[in-house]
Every structure is written in C-alpha cells, then in structure tokens.
Image (tube, rainbow, N blue to C red):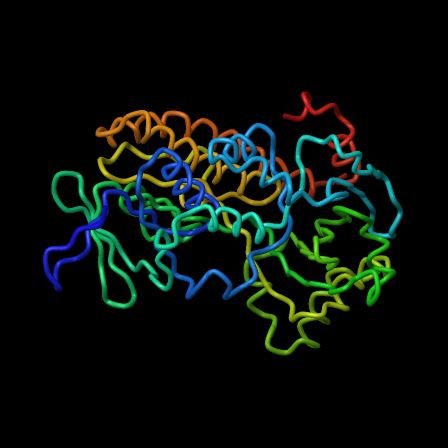
Amino acid sequence: MTTTTNATTPAHHPIAIIGAGLGGLTLARVLHVHGIDSAVFDLEAGRDVRRQGGMLDIHEESGQIALRAAGLYDDFRALVHPGGQACRVLDQHGVVHFEEPDTGDGDRPEVDRGQLRDLLLDSLPGDTVRWNRKATGARALDDGRHEVTFADGGSVTCDLLVGADGAWSRIRPLVSDAWPAYTGISFVESDLLDADTRHPAAAAVVGGGALFALADHRGVLAHRQTDGSLHVSSAVQIAEGWLDGIDFTDPRAATTAVLQQFAGWDERVQALIKDSDNPLVPRKIHALPVGHRWAHVRGVTLLGDAAHVMSPFAGEGANLAMLDGAELGEAIAAHRGDADKAVAVYEESLFPRSADKAQESVDGIGMCFGPNPIAALVGLFSAPRNETA
C-alpha cells in the first residue's frame, strides 16, 4: 500500500523495483501471486516506445521455472515460436557444418522478447508500473530504508529497494563499486523485414531458427523472428574504439565499414548486413567480473543484469533475470515481515548461480572467437544436453 503525508513528502512503498525488464516484472508478478504489492519504476515513457529485442530461448532449468512460479507457464507456451529451435552453423564461405531441425520436443523453446514482456505486464495490476521515471540516484536513510531520486525531480522511499535496472544500474553503487568492462566483442545489429518475400536468399541461409556463421574472430548471428523478419548481430572481436570510429548516422558509410570486417565472406551472409531495412545499431558488449558479489546490505539487493551482466555467449541473461525475480519474490513471500532474511536467502543462491553462468559466457566468447570456432560450436551442439549443462 502506498502512503503519503503531504505534497512535499516522497511517496513511500514497502517494495520498490527499479526497472521494468523481464527480471523486475517477474519479481512483481510473483509478489502479486502471493498477494504482496510492489511498485515498479522504469525510465521508458511507456510500454510500446521501443522494440524490445529479438528471440529468447527459455530454459527448462531457469526461465521456465520462473514462469511457473509466476503462474504464466501455459500462457508462455502459447507464445512459443514453432520451428524456432532449429539451428545452423556455417563457415565464412556459406558451407553448412551443422544443421538441426526443430522437432518440437526441445527444452529451450523460443519466444519473442516483446511478447514475453507483454505477457508479464498484462498479468500485473495496471498501476504497478510507473513509466517515465528514470532513476538518477539512490541513498540509504535510516532503519534500512532507501530513497530513490528520478530525473523529473521526484523521489520515493521504500523499505526494500530492488535494482533491476540493467548493466548501468543506478542502484548497484549502494552495494558494490564494480562496473561492467568491455569484453572485447562489438556487435552491429541489423533487421531484414518480411524476409521470405523481400530477402529470400538471406532467409534461406538463416533457415527456420538460428544461424551461427563464424570465422577469424568474427561472427554473423541471426534468428528468424515470429513476424517473419530476421534479426542479425554481426560480432567482431576488436578494440573498444572500433565502433566509435564509424558514423552510424550515415547508413551507407556505416554499412561499408562493417562489411570491411567481413570481406570475402559468402554473399548471402554479407547480405544480412548490407540489406538491412533498418539503420545499423552499434552495441559494445560489457560484463561484470565473473563471481561478482557483495556483502549483504539491509534493505537493498539486485537482480538480472544489475547483479551479473554478462555477454550473450551463454544465452543466459534473460533466463537468469527471470529466475532471480522469481526466487526473490518467493523468498519475500516465505519470510513475510522479515525482508532482510528473505534477501539473505535469495543472495545465498544468486551468487554461485550467476558466477557459474558468467564463466560460461566467458568460455562462450573463447569458443566462438577462438582458433577453431566451427568445430567447437558443432561439438557443443552435438553433445547430449546433460553433457553441456
């Protein structure tokens, strides 16, 4: 329940969640299932102001557990993209070294990130998420309470503050002085719309699900979306300043600069970059140190990328964020009236789990950008699941 004393006193919330990503929304939903109110604050002006990214494979041992805790598993299954678990591995010449169809019985079904976020948003009371509230800082008060300030000049206080606000979290400094570092990998993202009709050759090379084309410290990673488009991440292992030297406001110059990194590659793979229907988008890949943790601080904790941002080369980020949110929500419900105990229980599992997956992401970079990436990736995909978990 939200209470105020006068017009100048900040609103107070027992539980304030900063960030309406998948992790923060999962936490709010699990709390709601247990009859516990929370308030979510997000910097976006609204739920539909930007595209929410590409496809996600939701893992049986993490993301699916979170969705069951949220009471949304059956609704999630209705969103699964048929064929989305298909996979192809190519070299730079377009030669297929591995191909696996989607048989419909895999344990990592694919869904559209935006649709999954909408599912979570629609499962919450309409006033749970406060849009256009960009957190600019937070400070400890007394008795374990905290105050969060926003870019609009407002502020709120809370008994439990949860930083679910991503890699550049404004809440993390309350518990840790760690900061994400460049991993050595830069992405350039592109999108080919209505691919089967407008870009049939590119659509054919991607296939029905995911494509991994790797060679010489470079990769073109693509996935077919539920709307028939192709979302592509062109990855280069390169110095951090490379992207800074490209003028992405000039589409032709940006495309030329990126294609230089893939000179001599198969034309169908190059087309995933040069035929983009949207402007190319640069993205440097950052990560917190493997094993990032903090000493317990009363009244505040982190989840998702705020706690353990890592590269996407283990495919764990969204799944971990959702599992973090679900486990924290269940801990709060199990220890009603003792949020400090709930957070301690949650963090006890959070730290080793996130350390393991962060190391997997580091190893994934080594595999995809190492001396023989095709053999390494084919070996990974060919191994039984219990040997790769």
- Name the spot of residue 257 as percent of width and height, x first: 69, 69
**Residue 165 location (% of width, % of height):** 39, 51
Left or right: 117 with respect to 148?
Answer: right
Q: Does residue 294 appear anywhere in the picture?
A: yes
- Quadrant for the C terminus in the image: top right
Write the residue at 25% across / 32% down. Answer: 339
Residue 380 in the image: above or below residue 210: above
In front of the other: 3 or 354 = 3
User: Residue 14's spot in the image, x, y percent?
Assistant: 23, 43
* Residue 327 higher or lower than 263, as above or below: above
Query: Is residue 8 toward the left or the right of residue 111 in the image?
Result: left
Q: Is residue 53 above or below residue 84?
A: below
Q: Residue at x 25, y 41 (%)?
A: 160
Kindly tell me whether residue 219 is visible in this rendering.
no
Front-lying residue, 8 or 205 = 8
Q: Nearer the viewer, residue 24 or 280?
A: 24
Please state the total of marks drawn on the protein image: 0
Horizontal and vertical percent for residue 203? Answer: 82, 57
Q: Residue furthest top?
A: 386
Q: Is residue 328 above or below residue 2?
A: above
User: In the image, what residue occupies the spot 14% across and 46% down?
Assistant: 141
